[in-house]
C-alpha cells in the first residue's frame, strides 16, 4: 500500500474530473486520506462476494469487473480506465461486491474510506452532483448497449465496440485509427453476448471487406470510411 506522497501515477486523483470543483483545501484532504495499491496484469483486487467499504478510483491502468453466475459462467460487465471509479454503493453502507475486479494491465487503485467521502459530499455538494452525473453516463451507456442486443446485427455491435475502444486505446493514423486492444476475443465475446468463434469469424469478415486490419492479436486498425 502506498500513500499519495509516494505515488508515481501520471495524474493525481485529486485533479480528475470527478474532483474538479473541489477547493485546494478539500483536495488536500483527499490526498491525506488516500491509500494506493499497485497491481500487475491479472492481479485480483477483490473477488465477487467480498465486502467493500471504500470508494475506489483507477489512478493508472485498466481493470475489468467480471460477474460469475450460479452455473459458473463468467461475463465482463464493466471496464474501468484511468479516472473511472467504483464502490459508490459503499458510501451508503458496506456491501458485497457483485463482481470480481481484475487488472487488465499494470495499474494502480486509489481508495478513500467511505466516512471521508461522506464528509466531502456534505461539505461540497458539487462532488455529489459529479458522482451522479458519472453514474447517469454509465446508465445511458448500458441502456444503449442493451437496446442494440436484439436489434442490431453482430457486425454493427462489434464495430460499435471497436469504436468505443478506439476512444481510450486508439492512435490516430492518416488512414484510420490503430487500437491497442485491451480485450481478448473471449472478453469481446462476453461483452457482446456471443461465442468467441463468432467474434473471430466476424473480425476476419470485416478484414476481408477492408473495413479493419488485424495487425496482430491485439492491434487492430479501423479504416476511415
Image: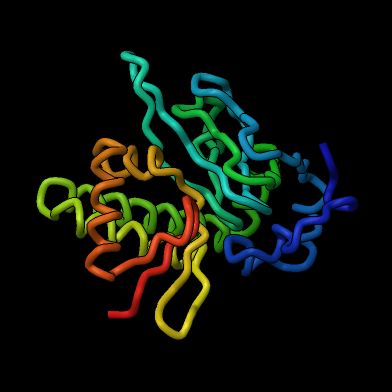
Check the picture and name the quadrant holding the N terminus. top right
Give how far across and how far down residue 69 sits, in percent.
Answer: 34, 20
Q: Residue at x 50, y 63 (%)?
A: 168
Quarter location, residue 13: bottom right
| Closer to us: 120 or 211 | 211
Q: Does residue 187 appear in the picture of this structure?
A: yes
Quarter location, residue 66: top left
Instruction: Give left or right: position of 9 versus 121.
Output: right
Residue farthest to the right, as pictured: 5
Q: Residue at x 69, y 66 (%)?
A: 15
Above-or-below relation of 183 to 95: below
Residue farthest to the front, as pictured: 208
Residue farthest to the bottom, as pictured: 174
Above-or-below relation of 12 to 2: below
Instruction: Give left or right: position of 201 versus 100.
Output: left
Above-or-below relation of 166 to 216: below
Q: Does residue 77 appear in the picture of this structure?
A: no
Give how far across and how far down residue 164 sits, in percent.
Answer: 38, 62
Amino acid at each position: 500500500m502506498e500513500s499519495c506522497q509516494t505515488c508515481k501515477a501520471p495524474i493525481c486523483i485529486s485533479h480528475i474530473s470527478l474532483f474538479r470543483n473541489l477547493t485546494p483545501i478539500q483536495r488536500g484532504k483527499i490526498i491525506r486520506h488516500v491509500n494506493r495499491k499497485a497491481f500487475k496484469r491479472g492481479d485480483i483486487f477483490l473477488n465477487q462476494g467480498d465486502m467493500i467499504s471504500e470508494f475506489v478510483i483507477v489512478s493508472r491502468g485498466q481493470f475489468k469487473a467480471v460477474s460469475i453466475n450460479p452455473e459458473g459462467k463468467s461475463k465482463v460487465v464493466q471496464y474501468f480506465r484511468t479516472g473511472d471509479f467504483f464502490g459508490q454503493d459503499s458510501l451508503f453502507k458496506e456491501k458485497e461486491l457483485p463482481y470480481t475486479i481484475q487488472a487488465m494491465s499494470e495499474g494502480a487503485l486509489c481508495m478513500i474510506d467511505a466516512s471521508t467521502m461522506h464528509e466531502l459530499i456534505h461539505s461540497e455538494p458539487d462532488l455529489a452532483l459529479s458522482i451522479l452525473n458519472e453514474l447517469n453516463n454509465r446508465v445511458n451507456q448500458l441502456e444503449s448497449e442493451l437496446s442494440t442486443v436484439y436489434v442490431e446485427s453482430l457486425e454493427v455491435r462489434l464495430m460499435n465496440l471497436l469504436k468505443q475502444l478506439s476512444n481510450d486505446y486508439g492512435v490516430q493514423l492518416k488512414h484510420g485509427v490503430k487500437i491497442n486492444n485491451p480485450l481478448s476475443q473471449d472478453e469481446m465475446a462476453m461483452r457482446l453476448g456471443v461465442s468467441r468463434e463468432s467474434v473471430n469469424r466476424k473480425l476476419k469478415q470485416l478484414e476481408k471487406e477492408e473495413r479493419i486490419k488485424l495487425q496482430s492479436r491485439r492491434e487492430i486498425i479501423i479504416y476511415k470510411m
